[in-house]
């Protein structure tokens, strides 16, 4: 079975200080990370701030490229893809759920959810139909015309989840999905994500520093100082 | 993202910041309005001059001092009444000839006074330049021969000086000398704000004495028909060259005057359009500025769209379409206001503005072009944003 995403000895370095000066400092955010996520898996990536968690998230989201090592989505190495291919890959294979929801203001829930389909040239009718179905799947059929400002935090995150699902991705990438929610609503959101993971068979990667959230995942990967903790990667089936 | 979708996004974005969009568009509105209006004024002036020259008739030749060319400084006339006489004699019965001498003077009738252009003319002037006498009669040959102090008034000069009475037989005073009014001309109408009916005509001999000169400014020659014009022009130049240097006079037909006048007025129109174009350019810079602010403000939106699969060119075209819609809307409003103001100018001022199709088309085309030109830089900047950086932008 082809892994959804495969990370092989990946490093990511940033050059600070504008990159031109002699004083430019190199930050090694990831120093050789290897793991894979299989279809339908639920993985939590846990680590304190500054651990390289965000960098890893950006790589798993195909928003960024590794400095060295291989990053493969469904077997395709991102080194062989140009920016346009990466955009298409994000559109087709990855669904994002952000801590800040990242919904467009002044835009209905339905239009927010249909947004990814705009970038694959779906017709308006098809977009509306699929967006409505995705909103139904997260229990918001009664909120299609509402704008983000008219929705509660939990409802906004559900809209964001519907938007991530509408393209039927292979990988659902959630960055601190409960970070802006109270614990009860957070638990509901995690239940929803878990349900989608099980029912729709979409691989779910949750990045969090919340141990309670992490504990829901069958597999946890701990990251610290740009490296994965060996004990957690040990869970990897060879 | 297709064009219709980009248009919808643009309209949403423009609508979200109504006041700012309106102020941005204002610059383009003013620019386009200026182009339409100023070109209309220039074209209107050209039409007026053309009509004025055509009023003189197509079989008229003018002899003017110096060489008549665009950019040529005016030259003092070396013509005399002898030249007029010689032309009349040599060219014979096929043509009628009139000389004139002009000056602006204050004309008085009792306690009323008016400023008028005083023209000294020969007795054939009315028939040569197609003027009709409404009341009384025109100057006679003997008036001119003897330098009699008589005058024929333009219709508005007559109205100004004699508002309540019949001017025929009354007296007007010009520079201390008294002239008896023998006739009033029919109304001609104003051209370019110049009242052509405020003239006062008198025998050229009397005018020469009044102004203390032997000079004649212009010689008018009317050929029997337009077909004779070339032949008459040839003979006329021959007669004048007997006494004058070729540089001291020019023989012009209506077509030549129209050509030179048209050249001057086309240049005027072009200069006006160029000035208006500068304001359009400034409007475009305003659009560019606001688009940059808009890109900055929507950095996170751009990051999100990229995360959801927008390609660089999707983002670029989104912002480019927004700039074009802004400028296009501004262009349409500007055309509307420009056409409206042109109509107002025609109604309430002596400047008849003529809106031309090409200026409207050009103004709209340029405003959309301004959108493309000044939208490209902000749009490309938006398209090139790194999604990682853009998503974290606060």
Image (cartoon, rainbow, N blue to C red):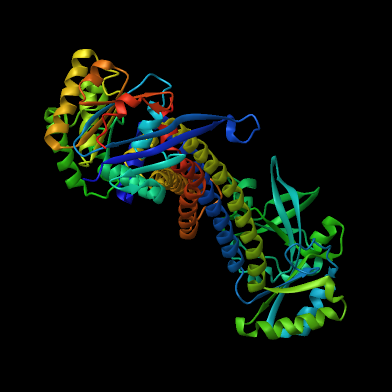
Q: Looking at the picture, how far across and down is residue B384, in whole percent?
A: 46, 42
Q: In this view, does A98 lie above or below A84?
A: above
Q: Looking at the picture, how far across and down is residue A70, in whole percent?
A: 39, 43
Q: Is residue B280 above or below residue A190?
A: below
* Corner quadrant of residue B221: bottom right
Task: From the viewer's side, name the closer residue of A55 and B4.
Answer: A55
Q: Is residue B358 above or below residue B156?
A: below
* Corner quadrant of residue A201: top left
The residue depicted at 16 percent of the width and 26 percent of the height is: A192
Q: Looking at the picture, how far across and down is residue A69, in whole percent?
A: 42, 41
Task: From the viewer's side, name the closer residue of A139 and A179.
Answer: A179
Residue situated furthest top in the rendering: A183
The residue depicted at 47 percent of the width and 38 percent of the height is: B291
Q: Looking at the picture, how far across and down is residue B51, in whole percent?
A: 56, 64
Residue B262 visible in the snapshot: yes
Residue B317 visible in the snapshot: no
Task: From the viewer's side, name the closer residue of A17 and B49.
Answer: A17
Q: Left of B11 or right of it: where is B291? A: right
The residue depicted at 58 percent of the width and 68 percent of the height is: B54
Q: Left of B301 or right of it: where is A112? A: left
Q: Which quadrant, please, contains the C terminus of chain B? A: top left
Q: How many numbered dots are placed on residues in this image?
A: 0
The residue depicted at 21 percent of the width and 39 percent of the height is: A39
């Amino acid at each position: 079975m082809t892994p959804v995403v495969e990370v092989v000895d990946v490093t990511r370095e940033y050059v600070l200080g504008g990159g031109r000066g002699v004083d430019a400092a190199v930050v090694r955010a990831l120093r050789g990370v290897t793991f894979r996520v299989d279809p339908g898996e639920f993985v939590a990536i846990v680590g304190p701030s500054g651990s390289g968690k965000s960098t890893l998230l950006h790589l798993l989201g195909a928003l960024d490229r590794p400095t060295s090592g291989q990053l493969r989505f469904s077997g395709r190495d991102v080194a062989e893809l140009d920016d346009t291919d990466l955009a298409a890959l994000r559109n087709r294979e990855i669904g994002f759920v952000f801590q800040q929801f990242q919904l467009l203001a002044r835009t209905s829930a339905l239009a927010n959810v249909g947004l990814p389909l705009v970038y694959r040239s779906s017709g308006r009718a098809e977009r509306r139909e699929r967006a409505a179905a995705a909103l139904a799947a997260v229990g918001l059929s009664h909120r299609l015309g509402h704008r983000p400002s008219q929705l509660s935090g939990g409802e906004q995150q559900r809209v964001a989840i519907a938007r991530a699902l509408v393209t039927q991705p292979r990988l659902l990438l959630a960055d601190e999905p409960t970070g802006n929610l109270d614990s009860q609503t957070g638990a509901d959101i995690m239940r929803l994500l878990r349900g989608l993971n099980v029912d729709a068979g979409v691989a779910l990667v949750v990045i969090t520093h919340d141990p309670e959230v992490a504990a829901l995942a069958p597999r946890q990967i701990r990251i610290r100082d740009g490296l994965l903790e060996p004990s957690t990667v040990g869970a990897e089936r060879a | 993202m297709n064009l219709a979708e980009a248009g919808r996004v643009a309209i949403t974005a423009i609508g979200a910041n109504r006041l700012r969009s309106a102020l941005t568009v204002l610059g383009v509105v003013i620019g386009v309005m200026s182009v339409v209006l100023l070109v209309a004024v220039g074209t209107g002036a050209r039409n007026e001059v053309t009509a004025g020259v055509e009023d003189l008739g197509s079989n008229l030749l003018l002899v003017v001092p110096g060489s008549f060319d665009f950019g040529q400084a005016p030259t003092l006339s070396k013509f005399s009444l002898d030249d007029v006489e010689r032309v009349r004699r040599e060219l014979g019965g096929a043509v009628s000839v009139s000389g004139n001498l002009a000056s602006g003077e204050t004309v008085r009738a009792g306690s009323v006074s008016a400023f008028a252009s005083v023209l000294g003319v020969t007795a054939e002037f009315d028939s040569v330049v197609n003027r009709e006498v409404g009341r009384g009669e025109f100057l006679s040959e003997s008036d001119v021969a003897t330098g009699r102090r008589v005058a024929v008034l333009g219709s508005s000069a007559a109205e100004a000086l004699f508002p309540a009475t019949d001017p025929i037989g009354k007296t007007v005073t010009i520079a201390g000398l008294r002239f008896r009014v023998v006739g009033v001309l029919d109304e001609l109408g104003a051209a370019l704000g110049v009242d052509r009916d405020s003239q006062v005509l008198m025998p050229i001999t009397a005018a020469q004495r009044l102004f203390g000169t032997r000079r004649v400014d212009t010689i008018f020659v009317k050929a029997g028909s337009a077909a004779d014009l070339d032949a008459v022009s040839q003979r006329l130049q021959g007669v004048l060259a007997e006494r004058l240097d070729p540089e001291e006079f020019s023989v012009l037909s209506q077509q030549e005057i129209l050509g030179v006048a048209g050249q001057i007025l086309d240049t005027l129109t072009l200069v006006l359009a160029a000035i208006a174009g500068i304001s359009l350019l400034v409007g475009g810079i305003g659009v560019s500025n606001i688009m940059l602010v808009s890109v900055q403000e929507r950095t996170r939106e751009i990051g999100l769209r990229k995360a959801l699969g927008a390609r660089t060119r999707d983002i670029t075209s989104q912002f480019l379409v927004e700039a074009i819609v802004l400028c296009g809307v501004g262009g349409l409003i500007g055309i509307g206001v420009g056409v409206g103001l042109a109509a107002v100018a025609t109604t309430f001022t002596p400047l008849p503005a003529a809106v031309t199709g090409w200026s409207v088309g050009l103004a709209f085309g340029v405003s959309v072009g301004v959108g493309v030109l000044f939208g490209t830089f902000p749009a490309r900047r938006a398209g090139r944003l790194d999604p990682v950086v853009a998503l974290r932008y606060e």
